[in-house]
Amino acid sequence: MNNQDLFLRDLSVLWHPCTQMKDHETYPIIPIKQGQGVWLDDYDGNRYLDAISSWWVNLFGHANPKINAALKDQLDSLEHVIFAGFTHAPAVELAETLVSVTPEGLGRVFYADNGSSAVEVALKMSFHYWLNEGRQRKTKFITLENSYHGETLGALAVGNVPLYKETYAPLLMDVITVSSPDCYYREAGESWADYSSRQFVHMENALKEHADSVCAVIVEPLVQCAGNMRMYDPVYLKLLRAACDKYQVHLIADEIAVGFGRTGTLFACEQADISPDFMCLSKGLTGGYLPLSAVLTTETIYRAFYDDYRKLTAFLHSHSYTGNALACRAGLTTLEIFRQHNVIEQNKKLTTFIAQSIERFTGHPHVSDVRQTGMIAAIELVKNKQTKEPYPWQERRGLKVYQYALSKGVLLRPLGNVVYFMPPYVINEEQIEFMVEVAWQGVQIATKN
């Protein structure tokens, strides 16, 4: 088997995500034969450094020996069982571990299949909680401009990236959208903290005006990942937690992409020393192995659903693969790796090295911003550096970076004109240098004229 053979077979039967399939008349799909650590190998002997953790899910490298061994062991005992009326050790142990490592007060775990599903669960739980409490007017949600929370209809509704949302607008519930604390637009010389604090006035006003009809505010803590990796200061989360308490509105922290060490702490909320009412987790939860998500919430919220069956207050939401034993075992092993190898502390060295490596982009004539939060770094390409005028999206400058990087053995997948790095934590300094050098050359080519 070779790349061309599998590519042609693929085109005859498959429809790929987030893709205009006609592009593949020009740009071939790359078949991957195997992965090892940060590397992916195709059928023709080429290697690619996975600089984006295969859509942000892989934490400890492909074919990680510890996770592999755990899954092989789990296969010999239980692959899956209905999770209504039944349970198993991996699900219980993973839930116990999640409760122990997430912010204080999150004592209950509800499993789902993926990030979008987790967001749907949190939205429904919040609405249903207020309904059970006799607050029937609470039916709306507040979200941030430029936010992204998934592709299912509820999750899409509370997002705000037009590329994903506009087509389906007639199908979506109405939400209240407020300006983002995204620090890209701060004034010259203004700190991230000052700008994010200043932007909070928009959220304060929305809560003050709509509190009686709002169930929850949903945010991606610190980094709006699909929204071009835009970043903001933890002070915004502190202000938001206090305001949600003041106006009796839930706070949903969507840590699907930013959780599990991506921002420099195990969870982004830690940097503001806050605890949300709901925390949505997925992606890195299983180390990039299997689909699984979890929604953590408080005992207070759990108790609002706990009553005699005839009261009809139960949360009747389910997925066939809820609490899948294999996925839970992978998740449990992922968290064991964090604990046993002091990963958060080790990542500080990598974070510093990435910061030093990308510093050269700040002087590029077509780079308006170089930003980083923990293990996430981004470079924004623009037509005019002084005015931050973006390149027309039709020019697909980011695609040029993507194609060049693949030709040199690096998997980058820019978000429009934003080149970013979110590598697995097993990457080393030599590999970071290679990854950044290829990105630098790709940016030179993409911004030539």
Image: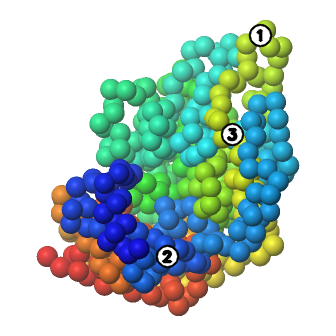
Mark 1 falls on what kind of element? helix
Q: Position of residue 78 (x, y in %)?
A: 79, 50
157 w.r.t. 423: above or below? above
Is the C terminus in the top left, top right, bottom left or bottom right quadrant? bottom left
Location of the N terminus (image quadrant): bottom left
Q: Earlier in the sequence, mark 3 or mark 2?
A: 2
Q: Is residue 186 left or right of residue 342?
A: left
Marks 2 & 1, CB-CB < 8 Å contact: no
Q: Amino acid at mark 2?
A: Leu
Q: Label 3, on which residue?
A: 322
State the CA–CA distance, disc 3 to disc 2. Answer: 30 Å
- Dot 2 or dot 1, earlier in sequence: 2
* Secondary structure at numbered mark 2: strand
Depth order, front residue of 269/16 = 16
Quarter-of-image position of residue 313: top right
Identity of the residue drawn at 34% across and 60% down: 9
Pick whichever, 182 or 170, lies toward us: 170
The residue shown at (53%, 74%) is: 34
Q: Which is closer to the viewer, label 3 or label 1?
A: 3
Q: Which residue is mark 2?
A: 40
Q: Secondary structure at mark 3?
A: loop
Q: CA distance from mark 2 to mark 1?
A: 53 Å
Mark linked to residue 117: none
The residue shown at (36%, 59%) is 10
Q: Nearer the viewer, residue 63 or 218?
A: 63
**Total residue callouts:** 3
Q: Residue furthest left?
A: 449
Q: Amino acid at mark 1?
A: Lys
Q: Given the current orientation, which residue lies at the most extreme bottom position?
A: 430
Q: Which residue is mark 1?
A: 311
